[in-house]
């Protein structure tokens, strides 16, 4: 296991995509210290900014990177990783686990926007809140998350799962507007409230809202009331209104919304 300790509080963004099990594996602490990163517009080495401690792994333990300290300005941790574990004991900055192919990232605090952007496999677990565009594509791209799992124990921001193609995003708290915008497939499971406009321009996939949502987009149509809904292997008790859309884009996505938490949507029942 490699443990990183920031030597000071970072005041400008640090681009550190080299903090990745695939890069660290088979390297000594001295070799890891020479890896190149950027602090603002200045080129640094990892050893300039972090104290690096190489601890002995047990024979059965997967390669692990542990980060102890404030890395809320450190971006691209775990980018393109395909194996091993990263544990961030605190907050993480943008682009955590972007294009991730495998392994596990755990953050005990919060994570910023574009967490898990374009990820293909693996698991990201955020114990706190997350920013906008979780599991989304970059601007100008249509390649969102295509596999894996993102679990957020707090709240999440806008456009979560934009252009999502496969996988699971689970938010224990509340979520911002446009969850699942341009969604192609996969599942977004929201245990809290939604700010609305969920599923805009979705083509396929499933969005489940267990809390309150202010309204349903007019390009969705109600087609059923379900006593429960299945999210992967979990049966979530309802009842749920089931809407289909986005019909403006010829979509066949499914939007499940709690009937109990949304009595203002009862007028839709006359169309069943």
Image: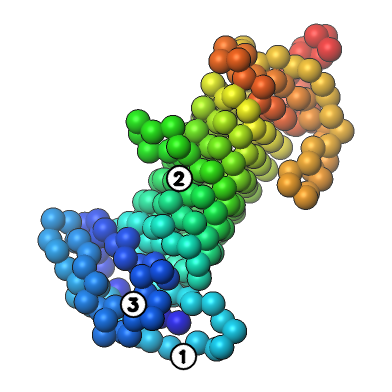
Q: Quadrant of the N terminus?
A: bottom left
Tell me which residue sits at (59%, 84%) in the image: 60
Q: How is the image coloured?
A: rainbow
Q: Residues within 10 Å of mark 1 (few under 14, many from 20)?
A: few
| Gap in angstroms between the C-alphas marked 2 and 3 | 28 Å
Q: Residues within 10 Å of mark 2 (few under 14, many from 20)?
A: many
The answer to whether any part of residue 193 appears in the image is no
Q: Which mark is residue 118?
A: 2
Which of the two discs, 1 and 3, labels the residue nearer the N terminus? Answer: 3
Q: How many marks?
A: 3
x 64%, y 39%: residue:
187
Left/right placement of residue 240 relative to residue 15 reads: right
- Name of the residue lying farthest toward the left: 42
Say which label, 2 or 3, has the lower sequence index. Answer: 3
The residue carrying mark 1 is 56
Q: Position of residue 76 (x, y in %)?
A: 35, 57
103 displayed left or right of 93? right
Residue picked out by circle 3: 5
Where disc 1 sits, the SS reads: loop
Q: Is residue 71 above or below residue 244?
A: below
């Amino acid at each position: 296991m490699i443990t990183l300790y920031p030597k000071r509080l970072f005041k400008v963004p640090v681009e550190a995509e080299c903090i990745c099990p695939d890069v660290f594996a088979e390297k000594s602490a001295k070799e890891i210290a020479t890896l190149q990163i950027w602090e603002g517009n200045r080129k640094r080495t990892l050893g300039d900014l972090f104290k690096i401690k190489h601890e002995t792994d047990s024979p059965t333990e997967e390669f692990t990177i542990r980060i102890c300290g404030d890395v809320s300005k450190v971006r691209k941790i775990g980018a393109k990783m395909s194996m091993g574990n990263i544990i961030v004991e605190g907050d993480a900055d943008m682009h955590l686990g972007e294009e991730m192919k495998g392994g596990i990232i755990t953050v005990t605090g919060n994570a910023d926007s574009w967490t898990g952007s374009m990820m293909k496999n693996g698991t990201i677990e955020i114990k706190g809140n997350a920013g906008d565009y979780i599991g989304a594509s970059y601007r100008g791209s249509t390649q969102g998350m295509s596999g894996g799992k993102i679990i957020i124990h707090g709240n999440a921001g806008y456009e979560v799962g934009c252009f999502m193609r496969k996988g699971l995003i689970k938010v224990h708290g509340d979520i911002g507007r446009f969850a699942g915008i341009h969604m192609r497939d996969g599942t977004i499971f929201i245990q809290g409230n939604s700010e609305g406009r969920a599923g805009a321009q979705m083509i396929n996939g499933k969005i489940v809202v267990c809390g309150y949502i202010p309204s349903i987009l007019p390009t969705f149509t109600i087609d059923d009331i379900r006593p429960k809904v299945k999210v992967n292997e979990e049966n979530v008790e309802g009842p749920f209104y089931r809407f289909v859309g986005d019909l403006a884009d010829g979509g066949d996505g499914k939007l499940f919304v709690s009937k109990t938490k949304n009595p203002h949507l009862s007028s839709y029942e006359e169309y069943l």
